[in-house]
Amino acid sequence: MAQNTSDAHILVSMTYVSRTNQDMTEQQLSDILQQARENNAANAITGMLVFKDNIFLQTIEGSRARINRLLYSLIADTRHYDLQVLETRELEHREWAKWSMNYAPSCAENSAIYLKYSTTEDFNPYLLSFESVRGLLDELSR
Amino acid sequence: MELKSAELPNSTNPTAHHGARIILRLTYVSRYNVNNANIEIARILEQAQRNNKRDGITGVLIINDNFFLQSIEGARPVINQLLRDLVKDDRHFALQIVDCHEVAERRWNQWSMKYLMPNELDKEQILKFSASEEFNPYQMSNEQIMLFIENLSKLEEQRASENEPL
């Protein structure tokens, strides 16, 4: 499996957006987050997650093989759909090394940050270039 | 080429055209499924070229006995629809995205799918970008993969022009 493949040395980051199939309760979201943190810790994956208006925006970092195995699971996961990879690249170092999954909850104060990178105050990373998404993630994590 | 991303089959979502102004280049490697008798390169290629032309996708495909190495370019939602289909395609497995980023211009705009098959002559190219003579894109970094594709493509164009009648 991945831990034995010869490309285990290559560190990559992948950023994607996806939509939930139905409105999510706080409990469901917290379960997803908990599960992601456990799986990520077991696979040396780190990252950052934003969830708002039924849209997930996530960056995951780890070995190329493991990140791509996670991509397979994500595509097969029926809790969300319309998954779009915005960027994948090799890394010199992780950007979210301290977190198995950092989470930015949606709150009113963040509207100014959405507006900074968007034409409206809405959170819609499907419309944004990766450069804007990156700035958005960075500011939301502060 | 006419882009009709909103009318793609399997696209159940009316907002799928979001981000369609962005050109995305996605490069991946995958392994042949040798147990699948369905592998017929000519047919795969013909099908890819037809679908890509319809969807405004351009790209290059490198095939050898074990691996696929492909770089595809197109509108962001269209490339991602293709990615979801590729992940479910049982003619290959262990697909790994090695790079995916926005580009200002396409590299393979002249081809709905340029096709390259490394031969004996290209051993040198493989060695140039690998630790061994064995072609295994899983061991190569993204930079090595991109340089390898670029060099192989130039060599092929050079050979094609040498063979043209005067």
Image (tube, coloured by chain):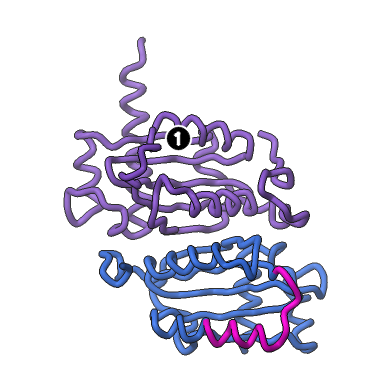
Q: In which quarter of the image is residue A80?
A: bottom right
Of the pair B99 and B85, the residue shown nearer to us: B85
Chain appearing in blue on the rendered image: A
**Identity of the residue drawn at 49% across and 83% down:** A96
What x and y, as percent, mark residue A119?
80, 67
- Left/right of residue A119 with respect to residue A130 in the rendered view: right
Q: Does the magenta stretch include residue A59?
A: no
- Tell me the kind of residue under disc 1: Ile
Placement of A119 over or under A45, stated as above or below: above
What secondary structure predominates along the stretch shown in magenta?
A: helix
Picture quarter with the C terminus of chain A:
bottom right
What x and y, as percent, mark residue A112?
78, 82
Placement of A27 over or under B61, stated as above or below: below
What x and y, as percent, mark residue B154?
36, 35
**Identity of the residue drawn at 50% across and 67% down:** A73
Placement of A119 over or under B17, stated as above or below: below
Chain appearing in purple on the rendered image: B
What x and y, as percent, mark residue B15?
76, 57
Q: Is mark 1 on a helix, strand or loop?
A: helix
Give the letter of the chain under mark 1: B
- Left/right of residue A23 with respect to residue B162 in the rendered view: right
Of the pair A49 and B1, the residue shown nearer to us: A49
Reading the image, the residue beneath label 1 is B44
Q: What stretch is highlighted in magenta?
A: A21-35
Q: In which quarter of the image is residue A42?
A: bottom left
